[in-house]
Image: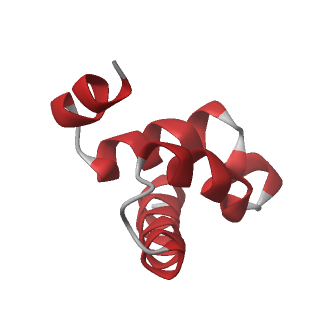
Amino acid sequence: MMKDFVSRITIESMIEYELINHDCFYTGEPLSIVDLIQSYYSDKPREGIVNLIKSIYHSKNKEMEA
């Protein structure tokens, strides 16, 4: 079931959703979702997930500040 879910969304969409869902923009702690994302994308290296989370967080944070 998890594979079906993951196949229907992009990792970027999931990260953006979870950043919002976990109030990461409010707390300033985007890496609090690393383990959650890793649980869905266990085939991806942790370092890659961390870098992607940071990138999306900073990009969306700039959009919200504008």
- The picture places residue 39, in percent across and down from the top left corner, at 54, 46
For the residue pair 17 and 64, the one nearer the viewer reads as 17
- The picture places residue 9, in percent across and down from the top left corner, at 23, 35
Q: Quadrant of residue 48?
A: bottom left
Rendered position, 4 above or below 56: above
Rendered position, 21 above or below 57: above
- The picture places residue 50, in percent across and down from the top left corner, at 54, 73
For the residue pair 10 and 16, the one nearer the viewer reads as 10
> Residue furthest toward the left?
8
> Residue furthest toward the top?
1
Q: Residue at x 45, y 48 (%)?
A: 15
- The picture places residue 41, in percent across and down from the top left corner, at 40, 52
Tag count = 0
Q: Is residue 8 left or right of residue 1?
A: left
For the residue pair 8 and 18, the one nearer the viewer reads as 8
Q: Quadrant of the N terminus?
A: top left
Q: Residue at x 50, y 65 (%)?
A: 53
Q: Residue at x 58, y 38 (%)?
A: 20
Q: Quadrant of the C terminus?
A: bottom left
Q: Residue at x 61, y 45 (%)?
A: 36
Q: Is residue 2 left or right of residue 54?
A: left
Colour scheme in the image?
secondary structure
For the residue pair 46 and 52, the one nearer the viewer reads as 46
